[in-house]
Amino acid sequence: SLRQRRAAQHRASAIFGSSPWLPLRDVKLGAGDAGRAPRRHFSDFISPGAAEGAGLRLAFAAACLPHPDKAQKGGEDAFFASPQRRAFGVADGVGGWAESGVDPGEYSRCLLRYAHEGIVEHGIPEKKADLQEALMIAARRLHESQLQGGSTALLGQLNGSTMGILNLGDSGAMLLRPALRTPPGSDQPLLFPRVVFRSSDQTHYFNCPYQLGSSSAPIEAPDYVRVRVRTGDIIVAATDGVFDNLFDHQVQALVARHLGGAWRSGASVEPQLQGLATSIVKQAQRIGQLEDQKDVITPFALAAHSEGLPFRGGKLDDTTVVVGLVCTAKADEGQGEDPKDGLPQLNNFIRDACSLFGGPALPSASRRPPHRVMCAKFA
């Protein structure tokens, strides 16, 4: 109803400090005067004259905020973003392995490092990688190393005007597109990022995601989707610590809050990406810390309720996000270079952790695999 929509808008304003709706002001959409090009102040939000898929690249920002109790070891999430390969990934080490004396973060970081190496091995940066093959190669290398643990994984790559996204488990990805929308009670169209695509979680049961791991449990098939993108689209890829605490509309409001000024003024959106990424992980963890607040409703609480489990409040966890902006590469700009050490430009890999497991076998007690899927406990 109209009353409910206005109440929802009011709640969003209270949470994020200002209305997520953005006035258009000088934006002109229609044709200009006879013989003139249309007037446009959309920044890199949209390029109507650009050839579809020609020279598209991804500009990235990333942020990772470990659970306070896991900060000393860097948390259990992993991420990478490579402008040169137009590729990204997030992974969440499965917390249940900690009960066996295993650091789940080592597994997730090695998994993404090996997956990135699999993408790079496809040759020249312009070439499309097989994301599923890159993930399977990473799984085989981890099995050969006998490193213990388990992890979810989400990989993505932009090729031309198509974004490929591979997802195993309960990390998630949203593709947002700045669009005109008229809010309730107004006849003035405003800018707001609408959802073009949203991935779905893969779980065996509540809080037990599909995963790659060193156990003998069979590997479930990941979801692979391809989405047509255009200049100005925003990709938000995050671990469950973000999406367990933030509803999609709250992520949309954060995007509007951080990028709206650039959309309105015609300034570049790219410099605003880091602030957006940082804000997403901080807001998710801020809500996650409200674990004992019974009046706080979160996506995690709703998922628990749908399976008959009594849970309210936030879910404190590592929060990790990679934000990407689809934009046009200038002729003198290139795709962005990765460092010479072979690692992606943005990552939280531990440089020598993965190489430690390429040598002699670990003691038998450390490498004996369980015969079941390991999952975080739900209290």
Image (spheres, rainbow, N blue to C red):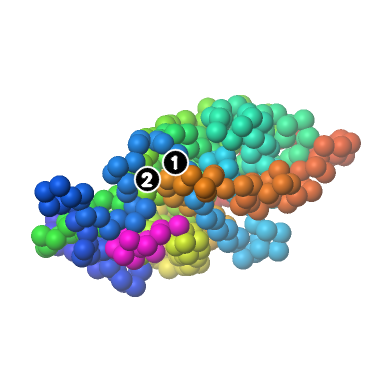
Q: Which residue is mark 2?
A: 231
The part of the image, by quadrant, that contains residue 181 is bottom left
In the image shown, does 153 or 230 lie closer to the viewer? 230
The N terminus is located in which quarter?
bottom left
Q: Could you give the CA–CA distance between mark 1 and mark 2, rounded to whole angstroms? A: 7 Å
The kind of residue on which mark 2 rests is: Thr
Q: Looking at the picture, which amino acid does disc 1 mark?
A: Leu
Residue at coordinates 55% horizontally, 33% vertically from top-left?
126
Q: Compared to 189, does 327 lie above or below? A: above
**Is disc 1 in contact with disc 2, using a CB cutoff of under 8 Å?**
yes
Looking at the picture, how far across and down is residue 212, in whole percent? 62, 35
**In the figure, is residue 18 to the left or right of 343?**
left
| Residue at 18 percent of width and 50 percent of height | 36
- Label 1 or label 2, whichever comes before in sequence order: 1
Residue 168 lies in the magenta stretch: no
Which secondary structure, mark 1?
A: strand
Q: Which residues are magenta?
A: 258-270
222 or 208, which lies in front?
222
| Residue 67 visible, this orientation | yes
SS at badge 2: loop
Q: Which mark is residue 145?
A: none
Residue 238 shown left or right of residue 350 in the figure: left
Image coordinates for residue 336, horizontal then vertical, percent = 57, 48
Which residue in the protein does label 1 denote? 56
The quarter of the image holding the C terminus is: bottom right
Look at the magenta stretch and give its main secondary structure: helix
